Amino acid sequence: MKLLAPAIVASLGLHAEAAQFVAHKNEVLGSKNDSCCSSLEVAGLKNIFYENDEQYKNRTASYWSVSAQLQPNCIVQPVSTEEVSTAVKTLGAQSNCKFAVRSGGHSTWAGSNNINDGVTLDLGLMNTTIYDEAANLARFQPGTRWGGVYGALEPYGVTVAGGRASSVGVAGFLTGGGNSFYTARRGFACDQVQNFEVVLADGEVVNANATSNSDLFTALKGGSFNFGIVTRYDVQTFAAGDLWGGVRVHDKNHTQQHVEAYTAWVDNVENYPDGSSIVFWSYLPAMKDIVIIAAYEDVAGNVAPAGFDKFMAIPALSDTTRKASHKNLTDELEQPTGYRDIWFTMTFKNDATVFKYIVDAHTKFVEAWKAISTDGDFITQCMFQAIPTTFAEHSKERGGNVMGLDLVKDNAVMLLFDIAVKGEETEVIAREALRAVTEEMQRFAASKDALVDWQYLNYADAYQDPLGSYGSANVAKIRAAAKKYDPKGMFQTQAPGGFKISKVKNSTFTKQEL
Ligand SMILES: Cc1cc2nc3c(=O)[nH]c(=O)nc-3n(C[C@H](O)[C@H](O)[C@H](O)COP(=O)(O)OP(=O)(O)OC[C@H]3O[C@@H](n4cnc5c(N)ncnc54)[C@H](O)[C@@H]3O)c2cc1C
Ligand SMILES: *[C@@H]1O[C@H](CO)[C@@H](O)[C@H](O)[C@H]1NC(C)=O
Ligand SMILES: *[C@@H]1O[C@H](CO)[C@@H](O)[C@H](O)[C@H]1NC(C)=O
Ligand SMILES: *[C@@H]1O[C@H](CO)[C@@H](O)[C@H](O)[C@H]1NC(C)=O
Ligand SMILES: *[C@@H]1O[C@H](CO)[C@@H](O)[C@H](O)[C@H]1NC(C)=O
Ligand SMILES: *[C@@H]1O[C@H](CO)[C@@H](O)[C@H](O)[C@H]1NC(C)=O
């Protein structure tokens, strides 16, 4: 049995016997004997769970992607900003303590939000939302899911720009950008944040907003987990009645019509900022085939407005479009759990030829995967979302972020290309296959001078370099804020998960390299 290092015990002002007791208790319970977990117990944190605890199993199972369900030595669930600060101080005092931070747990890849042989700080119990009517703000904690935020605000007739599936966590979403039904109207979800409360590496709790720690404020809008742990988001609210929207499913023989309608849609966003349209080609095991699925929304509640005419003219197999609340529409857009999910992203100029090439690449990918899949149990999505230049204009009007979309001078389309599979070995093969097809599609786009060197962080695989794709000035801002607010680089070395600025090579991939 390893005892806590005497120095650590002393620094926490505790008796060696207490530490010994904790370590002994862990051993008796058959838990991994880990001094980092023990020292958190000694520091007074209450909700510490080990692998045999039911809560440990439940929290592990609650990661959206099975790939992210790792085996930390313990899962710690702080209940307050003070407890987060205590945890950071305690772990920071022991440079051998590696840890991960998890809020909603929707990041897909292993190591993005969890850690083997380390401590996972799980913010899931910090999930309250307070509506501050006088300030027009929703103040919510990082463990909140978007459905919880919308549900809390709905009785007041207001909402915020956030996730389009209600179970998605607010924390990773907001620090990674956040594409919502409202982006064409208001910019990204991160652009609606008025203040972040942040626990820094030394445990200090600060506000980051337009007038205080403004460099940190800007860097947190897209810069992800590189500066500190956000413990509260104060986000601008606005009045919202029912929206119009829903899901239409189509036979894949309507591919060409959708490609044409979507290309026209992207260039029309600036004329129709109340609209939102996501279209994807998806292989579903239940259908044993690819179908086209479209999610349409009008945030002003106009029913099937003219902006959707080209889409609505395409015959549908089913159609749920209706007037409904923001929360209700996001409850509908949930996606199945229980799979190992691999997500890759790329961005291209709004070009129908590239669009069609990608849809065809997806079809070939599905055929190839069907041939090698032993269980036939997999789901793909080849999903398109508009990234017109107006998005970045809204961001700029609201103070700016570090995502670098202002550098993209053409209306663009963002692709999320993903597969959900079962089995660890299958995941390895699927990731290699997806990486290869993504590179092939990027090469094709580059050959048409239509590749956009920007990657959306919240859709990127570990192989990709979204922070590097923000452009050198933004990379420099992120580096400077990380250095200033975390001078020892604790969140780079002790918390290695997620996209780390210290791993950015300073050169975004270029067309020449492909
Ligand atoms: C079903 C589904 C639907 C989605 N829909 C959308 C959508 O509509 N629009 C969109 O833009 N994206 C969407 N996403 C992507 C989503 O934005 C990301 O998965 C995002 O990371 C989710 O946030 P989270 O809190 O659940 O993340 P987590 O997985 O908990 O964390 C993500 C990253 O943030 C870090 N982190 C977590 N909490 C904190 C904190 N408090 N402070 C600092 N860093 C922290 C983690 O360490 C990790 O690196 C969707 C994802 C899924 C699975
Ligand atoms: C774990 O999840 C199960 C099934 O949902 C539930 O019945 C149980 O109460 C949960 N346990 C804890 C400790 O939350
Ligand atoms: C907050 O978390 C608790 C514990 O998991 C859960 O019971 C509750 O429903 C959550 N609240 C919201 C608003 O989601
Ligand atoms: C910005 O931070 C300062 C310092 O903590 C605080 O006094 C002020 O209220 C914050 N502003 C907003 C908009 O939250
Ligand atoms: C497309 O598929 C639908 C539904 O399967 C079918 O009714 C229709 O005839 C097909 N149209 C074409 C042009 O093949
Ligand atoms: C949306 O609201 C309707 C009407 O209240 C309800 O019948 C439906 O189940 C809700 N949909 C979802 C996905 O929650």
Image (cartoon, rainbow, N blue to C red):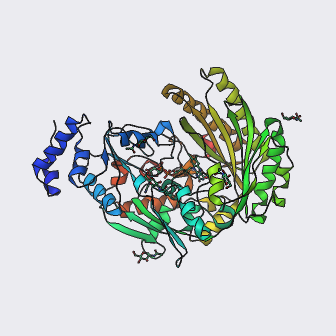
Please tell me which residue is depicted at 41% across the width and 43% down the height of the picture. Answer: 59
Residue 491 location in percent, x, y? 36, 53
Please tell me which residue is depicted at 54% across the width and 26% down the height of the picture. Answer: 426
Front residue of 126 and 175: 126
Number of disc labels? 0
Q: Point out the image quarter for the C terminus.
A: top right
Q: Point out the image quarter for the N terminus.
A: top left
Question: For this view, does 23 lie left or right of residue 374?
Answer: left
Residue 395 appears anywhere in the view: yes
Residue 29 location in percent, x, y? 23, 36
**467 is higher (above) or lower (below) than 359:** below
Front residue of 153 and 394: 153
The quadrant in which residue 395 appears is bottom right
Residue 407 appears anywhere in the view: no
Question: For this view, does 46 lie left or right of residue 383?
Answer: left
Please tell me which residue is depicted at 33% across the width and 39% down the height of the picture. Answer: 53
The quadrant in which residue 406 appears is bottom right
Please tell me which residue is depicted at 65% across the width and 61% down the height of the picture. Answer: 183
The quadrant in which residue 369 appears is top right
Residue 174 location in percent, x, y? 52, 59
Residue 476 location in percent, x, y? 47, 60
Question: For this view, does 98 lie left or right of residue 350?
Answer: left
